[in-house]
Each structure stands twice: as structure tokens, then as C-alpha cells.
Image (spheres, rainbow, N blue to C red):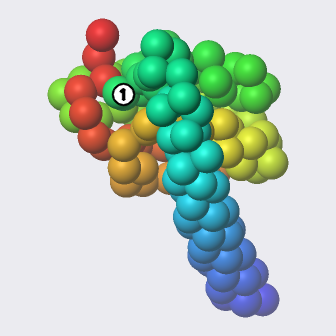
Amino acid sequence: ILGGALLLSACCLALIGNCVRLHYAALRQGGELARLRQDPLLKKYPSAPAPPEQLDLETARALGEKQGLTFVSSRGGDNEMELLFTGGYTVFLDYLRALSAEPSGEISQITIGQEQKIIIKGEQYAK
């Protein structure tokens, strides 16, 4: 019975991981479509401020707090930002939706457990 429960738990975790990957891929596509819709506006109003070139740590934390996440810790460094927080699965997906609208680099790791961790690699994120 214990082996079956462990196997079922492993399958559930794998399924959750795949769902998160699929959601993030869909969000990424939505972000690209938003940029395509934004291009004509930027051409029409060239004096409008351009979107930021990179996502900084404070903006990432503010986005998460706005979505209802509680940050445990976060750090930024050369070409990497790591965010560790607690919050529900749907809150986490809302955070990914908000993050996809930002130029966030490459999300290289997402861990879902009691504490969720997301690592973003790309430009230097430290201010």
C-alpha cells in the first residue's frame, strides 16, 4: 500500500510539473502576442516610454505580492534571479501570468512544494 501511495504521489507531482510547464508556455505566447499588439502603439506614439529591458528583483517581488504571494527570500545576481515564496497553486499561476507580461528572461527552474521556487536566467537583474 505504501509503495502504491508513493507511486501515486510521484505521478501527481509529475502531472503538476507538466501543467505548470504548459501554462507557462501558453503565458509566454500570450506575452509575445501582447508585444505584437503593442508595436503599432509604440510606432504611433514614439515618445511613449519603452518597456523595461529587464526585470529587476523589486519589480518581481512587487508583482508577486500584488498577486497574493508571501516571499520567503529572494536574491539577484549576475545573470540570475531566484525567488522563494509561499502561496497557493492558483496564486502561483497568476504570478506567472503577470510575470509573462514582463521581459523576464528564461525561467530555468520551477519547483512546487510547500515553498515554491522560481529561478530566472537572463540579463543581470541586480540594480
Q: Residue at horizontal 35%, vertical 27%?
A: 53
Q: Alpha-carbon neighbours of circle 1 within 10 Å: few (<14), some, or many (≥20)? A: some
> Which quarter shows the N terminus?
bottom right
Classify residue 118 as left or right of residue 2.
left
Q: How many marks?
A: 1
- Is residue 2 in view? no
Q: Which amino acid lies under the numbered mark 1 shown in the image of this protein? A: Gln
Up/down of 102 relative to 112, above or below: above
Residue that mark 1 sits on: 54
- Is residue 123 in view? yes
- Image coordinates of residue 51 in percent, x first then y, are 46, 25
Q: Residue at horizontal 45%, vertical 21%?
A: 46
> Which quarter shows the C terminus?
top left
Q: Quadrant of residue 63?
A: top right
Of residues 24 and 45, the one drawn nearer to the viewer in this rendering: 45
Classify residue 68 as left or right of residue 62.
right
Of residues 12 and 80, the one drawn nearer to the viewer in this rendering: 80
Up/down of 6 relative to 53, above or below: below
Q: Residue at horizontal 53%, vertical 22%?
A: 45
Classify residue 107 as left or right of residue 23.
left
Up/down of 29 relative to 93, above or below: below
